Image: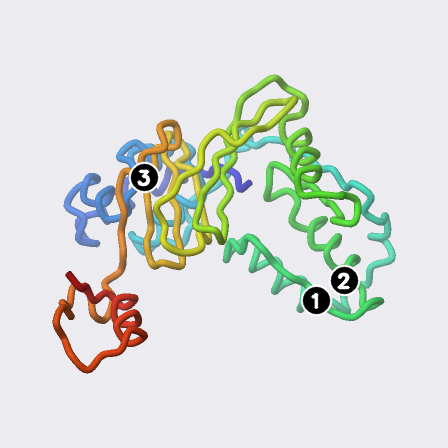
Amino acid sequence: MSRSIQLKPEFKKSIKALLPRNHFPSQQALTDHLGLSRDVISRFLNGKPVDRLNAEEICQALGFDIREVTYIEETQRKQTKIDWGEAISSFDLFDRSARTKELETLTQWITEDKCRVILIEAIKGMGKSHLSYQLVQENKNDFDFVSVRSLDQYESIDELLTDWLYFINNEEDINQWLASSSYDTSIRLWKLSSTQYSCDKILLGHGNAVMCVTFHPHEPILASSSKDGTIKRWNYLTGECLSSWRSPRPYENMNITGVTGLNSAQKYALKTLGAIEN
């Protein structure tokens, strides 16, 4: 999980002044453009800590380099919690000079491009594990939690998830939420505690595999994106779908009712691309 960051004090006035120059006559206009809450926009522009992903969206909209105008306040930083599991202890034997290019590419994917899953594939004996552990070692301070696990240690995904939840919760008696997306078009909301986890809700509404889910940092809102071309916003406490967006498709709302000369496969293809049939 990436850390919260905040605007440097010396940039407060200049960034606020850039709102109208970037066609945002007010903070509310920027709020509507980005789809973030007014509270997040206001907190960031006034130098308060916000989620890094939100800060990146705001800086991009205003044309600022996030690395130049923001920082992580030392008093806000948490010590990274690390569990190396059964990882091999061989960092001193790793020849970094021979893998510099790979490490730089992987670091960019993780810290800048925000890739959620990365596959390192090679034949046995090529140093995949050493490379992975070195990557974690070099980037661990950018995250609150680092857990290294081998799937060979577990008989089921439930066992792995339970182990991971105990690590995250640190055996504290707290309730948290976890959302998982699936190729079966569903979103599952898991209620977590220090001793157990359970599926609390199943959200249905997407027409294809759900590829990504993310929580709002301050409100009970979950966003999801799917291969069906839609983004949906949910209230994860009630399970209600609050809104849905779809990029216009090539044949959006073209009525093919009564059209002749099309077979069933062609009609299906046109409907997939936005056509409708009454």
**Residue at left offset 40%, top offset 59%:** 227
Q: Earlier in the sequence, mark 3 or mark 2?
A: 3
Name the disc covering residue 121, or none: 1
Q: Quadrant of residue 103?
A: bottom right
Percent x, y for residue 127? Answer: 80, 64
Percent x, y for residue 7? Answer: 39, 39
Residue closer to the observer: 259 or 162: 259
Judged from the image, the secondary structure of the residue bearing numbered disc 1 is: loop
Residue 118, compared with residue 66, is above or below; it is below
Count of numbered circles in the view: 3
Percent x, y for residue 101? Answer: 67, 69
Does residue 14 appear in the picture of this structure?
A: no
Judged from the image, the secondary structure of the residue bearing numbered disc 2 is: helix
**Residue at left offset 15%, top offset 61%:** 278
Percent x, y for residue 92? Answer: 85, 53
Residue bearing the label numbered 3: 12
Residue closer to the observer: 89 or 245: 245
Q: Nearer the viewer, mark 2 or mark 1?
A: 1
Residue closer to the observer: 179 or 131: 179
| Mark 3–mark 2 distance (CA, rounded to whole Å) | 45 Å
Residue bearing the label numbered 2: 128
Residue 77 falls left or right of residue 223 = right
Q: Earlier in the sequence, mark 2 or mark 1?
A: 1
Dot 3 alpha-carbon crowd within 10 angstroms: few under 14, some 14 to 19, many 20 or more: some
Amino acid type of the residue that numbered disc 3 sits on in the rendered structure: Lys
| Mark 2–mark 1 distance (CA, rounded to whole Å) | 7 Å
Q: Nearer the viewer, mark 3 or mark 1?
A: 1
Judged from the image, the secondary structure of the residue bearing numbered disc 3 is: helix
Residue 55 falls left or right of residue 24 = right
